[in-house]
Image (cartoon, rainbow, N blue to C red):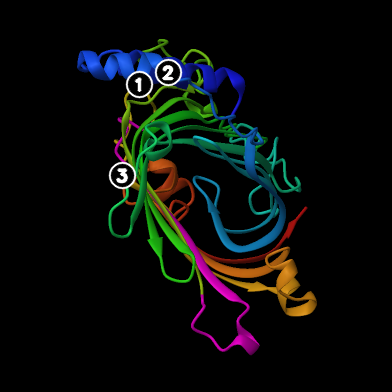
Amino acid sequence: MTNHFRAIAAATFLSLAAMVPMGAASAADMAAMPVKAKPIPDLPFFLLIDNRFTYAYQWGAVDPGVTNNTTKQVFAFTHFDVWTYGTNFFNIGLEKAGKSSPANPCADPRFPAITGCEGATEIYGLIRSTIGFNEVFNTKAFTMGPLRNVSFVIGADGSTENRFFAASKRDVVAGLQFAFDLPYKGFFNVNPLLYYEFANHSTFTQCGFGVGGVAGVTCNADGSREFKPTWAVEMNYYMDLGFLPESINYFSVSGRAGFYGKKGGENGQIAGTDTKIELNAEPIRLTFDASKAIWGAKYTHNVDVWVAYRMWRNKFGLDENASFACTVAAPGSCREDSLYSGITVKF
């Protein structure tokens, strides 16, 4: 804890203590007693820092309006830290699609003869930060049974790509996190959130493309769509398979799921098919702790090899049964069921 935070905490404590009534004798006794402050230990700002790099390969991915079947290579950096009052999680990744999901200028309907483009590249980032109520109020009041803590959570997401569609997503989230303990040093977190996707570009809604139109009425001036704030629930879990015999105790399971509410029309400010509730999930990932198996417990989870199942319904909020992109432009391209595998290295 920094000296600045110590000073704030001490001032708050003293201001509250001054409001507590006491008898004259007690006041005199305290005035007569010498006061010797106990030194506060100088703790590091970060109690834990964990950085990892991942390479993965995905089969059966989809891109709405483009393809219902493509491969993707994924390169990602993940950072996680714990500090005195909470946690920070940051992930930035690059996805390289196969040629069935091409980069510019392929898939431009004005020039259908252009073919042979390389697969599109998407760069995305995500950040989530929590402030624990137990830590802020120096209490255990938010711990009961399997519930370990309740926290305030805030975050943001962003992405950009070089497809003709040129999506460029920006959103913010805020809400609470309920953290539960699972057996074998596991956890299960549930985050009810407010979700606001305030920008996401679409070439097809931009004024001047195709027949054009009236900005804000039949087209978007720069192609940027703004959606209505909505609700979201994000969940994730992790658990070692500690019940396995020690000779093969190298496996763990984890997963995540995100539910995002309807956010208005799919074209943002202008008329379009209504969005639907979106589910973006990885129900299960089976991880093999290769470094522990090879080098021993000292190197637990330094090198992980994993395989996972991924499901996505109404991808990006598009109605998979009604949206033009999902049913006409590329049927089945808004519903994903894919398998992917990768390796994650801690450094």
Question: Can you see residue 306?
Answer: yes
User: Mark 1 and mark 3 in contact (Cβ < 8 Å)?
Assistant: no
The range drawn in magenta is: 241-266
Distance from disc 1 to disc 2, alpha carbons, whole Å, reads 6 Å
- Residue at mark 3: 142
Label 1 crowd bin: few (<14), some (14–19), many (20+), radius 10 Å: some
Q: Residue at x 38, y 39 (%)?
A: 134
Q: Quadrant of residue 122?
A: top right
- Residue at mark 1: 270
Name which of mark 3 and mark 2 comes first in the sequence.
3
Q: Amino acid at mark 3?
A: Phe
User: Mark 2 and mark 1 in contact (Cβ < 8 Å)?
Assistant: yes
- Residue at mark 2: 219
Q: Amino acid at mark 1?
A: Ile
Indicate which label's residue lies in the foreground, 3 or 1: 3
Name which of mark 1 and mark 2 comes first in the sequence.
2
Q: Residue at x 64, y 38 (%)?
A: 46
Q: Amino acid at mark 2?
A: Cys
- Residue 280 in the image: above or below residue 108: below
Q: Residue at x 29, y 37 (%)?
A: 262
Question: Can you see residue 68?
Answer: no
Residue 305 at x, y percent in the picture? 68, 69
Q: Nearer the viewer, residue 175 or 292?
A: 292
- Residue 42 in the image: above or below residue 297: above
Residue 11 at x, y percent in the picture? 44, 14
